[in-house]
Amino acid sequence: MLELAAKVHDESRQGEAYAPFAGDPTVYRKKFYIESYGCQMNFSDSEIVASILNGEGFGATRNLEEADLVFLNTCSIREKAEQTVRKRLTDFRKMKENKPGMLIGVLGCMAERLKAKFLEEEKLVDMVVGPDAYRSLPGLIEEAETGQKAVNVLLSRDETYADISPVRLDSNGVTAFVSIMRGCNNMCSFCVVPFTRGRERSRDAHSIVHEAADLFNRGFKEVTLLGQNVDSYYWVDEATQQQGETARAVTFAELLEKVALISPDLRVRFSTSHPKDITEEVLLTMAKYENICKYIHLPIQSGNTRVLQLMNRTYTREWYLAKVDQIKRIMPDCGISSDIIAGFCTETEEEHRETISAMEHSRYDMSYMFFYSERPGTLAARRYKDDVPEDVKKRRLQEIVEVQNRLSLESNQRDIGRSFKVLIEGESKRSNDDWMGRNSQNKVIVFPKGAAEHKKGDYVWVKVNSCTQATLLGEMVTA
Ligand code: 5AD
Ligand code: SF4
C-alpha cells in the first residue's frame, strides 16, 4: 500500500494497549484493555478513559485475553483508518465466541461519526461512546452488563476533562502529552474532525500548568501541548472578572510561556499549528525560551492557492511560504514538518507540481503524506467530485514521498558536524549499548552509551557524525 509506504502519522501508531494498573489486582471489579488508533489526541484521550475507569475500580491490562472490557479508541480521518478498526473488530468477534461475558466498546471519532448505526453494522459491539462522553462510561458499562446496547455520542460545548488526571501508562517516563483544547472550528473541507470532535473549546490554563508541573515533579522532562489547532487556544479566566471589567484571557503564547517557566529543565512542544493562526507572538515566545523546542508542525496540505481555497484552508501559497520565511527569520534553526494531501478534488498536474515546489521552498525536515480520501458528510464530499483517479493520486503521493525523502536526508546531512542538546528517551531499539533521544528540532539521535553514567531523562550533548534519512548518529561530547 502506498499510503503505508509514506510516513503515515496516525495509522502507524496503532494497537498500543495500556500497562496494568499499578494497584492491587485482587480489588479490580473488572479488567479493561484499550487499543488506540489515530492521532496523538486519541492516545491522550485513552489516558483519560483509563483514569475514569481506574476511579471506578476497573484495572487496565495489556493482555487482551484476560480483559472483560475491550475498548477500541477509533479514528475516522481516512477510510483506511476505519477499515483497520473493522478488521480488528473481526478478531474480537472470534474471541467473544469463547468468552460471551466480554463487552466491546467503540470509542472516539468512528463512534461519533456512525453513532447507533455502528450497533446495526457491527452487532457484537456493546457500547458506542463519542469523544465528549467518556465521563458516562461507568454508567454505560453497567447498562451493557444488563444486556442492553449502550450509546452516548453527545458532543459538548464545554467538556475539556480539565479535572481528570490522565493515567500515564505505557509511558517512557520522560515525555508526555497534555491536552489543552478539544474540537475544531476550522472546517477544512476534506476533514471529518469538526463533525466527530465538535466545537473548539480551551481547557483551564491553571489545570494545564498544574498537570505539566506535576509531570515534571514526577520525573518527566518533556510535555507536548496537544490540540487540533493549538494557536487558537483562548481561555477566559472568569475568576479575574472584576465588577464592570472584562475577565482576563490567556492566549496560546501566554500559555506556552507559563508552561516554559515551570522549569528550564522541562522541554515544551506543541502540536498542531494552523498556518493562519500561528502568531508572531508565539514565534517570539519560542525564541525567548531555550526549553520551548524549536520545532513546528505546520501542515500545508497543498502548495496551490486554488486547491487551498477549495480545501477552505483560508491562506494562499504565498501567505504560507511567507510564514515559513518568518519562522526561519526569527528562529534560523527551527525544524518544520508538514501534512500533505495528494490528489484532492480537481487537482491538476501543474497544481500538484506547486505542492512539490512549496515543499522544496519550505525544506521540510519531515512530512506526513496522504492521498485524498473522501469522507462522508464533509464539505468536500458534498460540494466537489472526488475526480482524481486512484492511480494518479498514488503516483502523485509517491512523487511527494520521494521529494520528502530527499529533503529529510539533506536536512540530516546539514547537521553532520553539529552538536545538539539531546534528551535521552530510552535505549535504542537496535542496540542496548546505544541511547536514543531527540534534539530540540525533534530529530531522533542515536549514540553509544559509552562509559558515562547516564540514564533516561538526562540531557546530554551529542555531536552528529553521520545520518540516515530518518536518524542522526553521533557521540556524546562535553557541552
Ligand atoms: N484525506 C486524506 N488526508 C486527510 N487528512 C485529513 N483529512 C483527510 C482526508 N479526507 C490529513 C490532513 C491532516 C492530517 C491529520 O490528515 O493532512 O492534516
Ligand atoms: Fe484523531 Fe479523530 Fe482526527 Fe482520527 S479523526 S486523527 S482520531 S481527531
Image (cartoon, grey):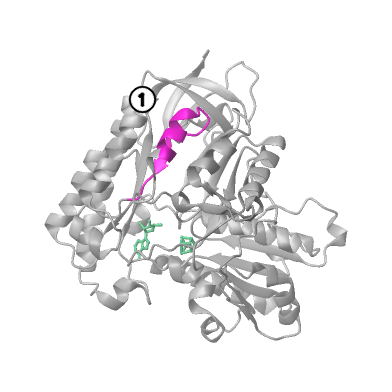
> Could you tell me if residue 277 is visible in this image?
yes
**What is the crowding at mark 1: few (fewer than 14 residues within 10 Å), some, or many (at least 20)?**
some
Taking the image as shown, residue 73 lies to the left or right of residue 318, namely right
Closest to the observer, 348 or 271: 271
Q: Residue at x 25, y 47 (%)?
A: 319
The spot of residue 428 in percent (x, y) is: 54, 33
Q: Residue 110, how many percent across, how many down?
A: 50, 71
Q: Is residue 440 magenta?
A: no
Q: Residue furthest front?
A: 244
Q: Residue at x 67, y 41 (%)?
A: 215
User: Can the viewer see residue 15 in this picture?
Assistant: no
User: Residue 286 placed where, x, y %?
Assistant: 45, 34
Question: Residue, x 67% and y 63% (percent of image)?
Answer: 33
Can you name the residue that lies furthest to the top here? 478
In the depicted structure, whether residue 116 falls above or below residue 175: below
**In the figure, 349 relative to 132: above or below?**
above
Disc 1: residue Cβ within 8 A of ligand 1's nearest atom: no
Quadrant location, ligand no. 1: bottom left
Secondary structure category for the residue under label 1: loop
On the image, the x and y values in percent for residue 100 come to 71, 79
419 displayed left or right of 139: left
Instruction: Give the residue at the far left of this rendering.
Output: 350
Q: Magenta segment, which residues?
A: 281-299
Left or right, 94 with reference to 444: right
Q: Which residue is mark 1?
A: 415
Viewport quadrant of the N terminus: bottom left
Q: Could you tell me the amino acid type at mark 1?
A: Asp
In the depicted view, which residue is nearer to us: 144 or 122? 144
Q: From the viewer's side, name the closer residue of 476 and 304.
A: 304
> Based on the displayed image, in which of its 4 quarters is residue 384 positioned?
bottom left
> Magenta includes 284?
yes
